[in-house]
């Protein structure tokens, strides 16, 4: 049983009712006087992953299971300023499941993970830095994890236009290293204004190919 957990209950009706309770030494909680209907229950306690569920008012056999979590804190070193899209990726060594943690402006990050062994690295959709193995043990927060981001690389960005000068929305742009198409390519899509961006490119010349519903082009 988990004592001292904060329980929030939201009961719908003519007027939304919100109550806050705390579990007793046996992990129990009870709220009476509810009208028939659906009640949303959220349970939280430090050291556990918050749980949220919906159930019918009047039930007295509800069992909510909280999962133990471990807080992981650390800092990321960049070769320059943090680049857009970079996050910390923590991959469970046993299951392969992944958790993402946001990197703050000062390079720090915080994650909550279940006990286990994890490979932690800095990554975005196209790059991953060197991994650091961390072992999360229940009741033992992890501090001072240091990660190094992969080199930012170069950026090619621009805007794709149709022959009449209108933005080519939701179209494809491909970047080929060198002077001709090949298998080592990267693809990007255009947004509502026709803009596209490639990140993490190695130095050197690139051939750009673009296609839209109205034609194709190479640059």
Image (cartoon, rainbow, N blue to C red):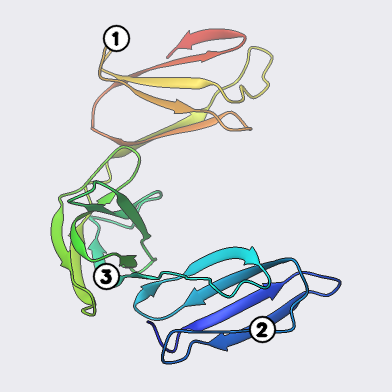
Residue 168 location, x and y as percent?
Answer: 61, 21
Query: Label 1 neighbourhood size at 10 Å, few (<14), some (14-19), many (20+)?
Result: few
Q: Secondary structure at mark 2?
A: strand
Residue 77 location, x and y as percent?
Answer: 22, 61
Tell me where residue 183 sits by quadrant. Answer: top left
Residue at the image point whose x is 31% and y is 70% from the top: 69
Q: Earlier in the sequence, mark 1 or mark 3?
A: 3
Residues under numbered marks 2 and 3 in contact, where contact means CB atoms less than 8 Å apart: no
62 above or below 97?
A: below
Q: Secondary structure at mark 1?
A: loop
Q: Secondary structure at mark 3?
A: strand
Mark 2 or 3: in front is 2
Q: Which residue is mark 2?
A: 19
Residues under numbered marks 1 and 3 in contact, where contact means CB atoms less than 8 Å apart: no
Mark 2 or 1: in front is 2
Foreground pick, 82 / 5? 5
Q: Earlier in the sequence, mark 2 or mark 3?
A: 2
Residue 170 appears anywhere in the view: yes
Q: Distance from label 2 to label 3 (Cα)?
A: 31 Å
Tell me where residue 54 sits by quadrant. Answer: bottom right
The quarter in which the C terminus is drawn is top left
| Label ID, residue 72 | 3
| Label ID, residue 180 | 1
Mark 1 or 3: in front is 3
15 above or below 213?
A: below
Residue at the image point whose x is 25% and y is 57% from the top: 78
Foreground pick, 52 / 194? 52
Foreground pick, 39 / 143? 39
The quarter in which the N terminus is drawn is bottom left
Residue 107 location, x and y as percent?
Answer: 31, 66
């Amino acid at each position: 049983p988990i004592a001292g957990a904060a329980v929030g209950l939201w009961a719908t009706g003519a007027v939304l009712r919100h109550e806050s309770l705390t579990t007793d030494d046996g992990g129990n909680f009870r709220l009476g006087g509810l009208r028939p209907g659906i009640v949303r229950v959220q349970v939280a306690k430090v050291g556990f992953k918050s749980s949220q569920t919906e159930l019918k008012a009047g039930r007295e056999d509800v069992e909510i299971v909280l999962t133990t979590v471990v807080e992981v804190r650390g800092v990321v070193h960049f070769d320059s300023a943090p680049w857009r899209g970079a996050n910390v990726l923590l991959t469970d060594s046993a299951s392969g499941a992944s958790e993402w943690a946001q990197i703050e402006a000062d390079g720090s990050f915080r994650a909550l993970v279940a006990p286990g062994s994890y490979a932690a690295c800095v990554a975005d959709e196209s790059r991953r830095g060197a991994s650091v193995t961390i072992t999360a043990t229940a009741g033992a927060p992890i501090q001072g994890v240091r990660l190094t981001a992969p080199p930012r690389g170069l950026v090619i960005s621009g805007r794709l236009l149709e022959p009449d000068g209108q933005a080519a929305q939701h179209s494809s742009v491909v970047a080929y290293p060198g002077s001709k198409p090949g298998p080592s390519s990267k693809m990007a899509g255009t947004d509502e204004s026709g803009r596209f961006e490639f990140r993490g490119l190695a130095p050197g010349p690139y051939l750009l190919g673009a296609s839209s519903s109205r034609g194709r082009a190479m640059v």
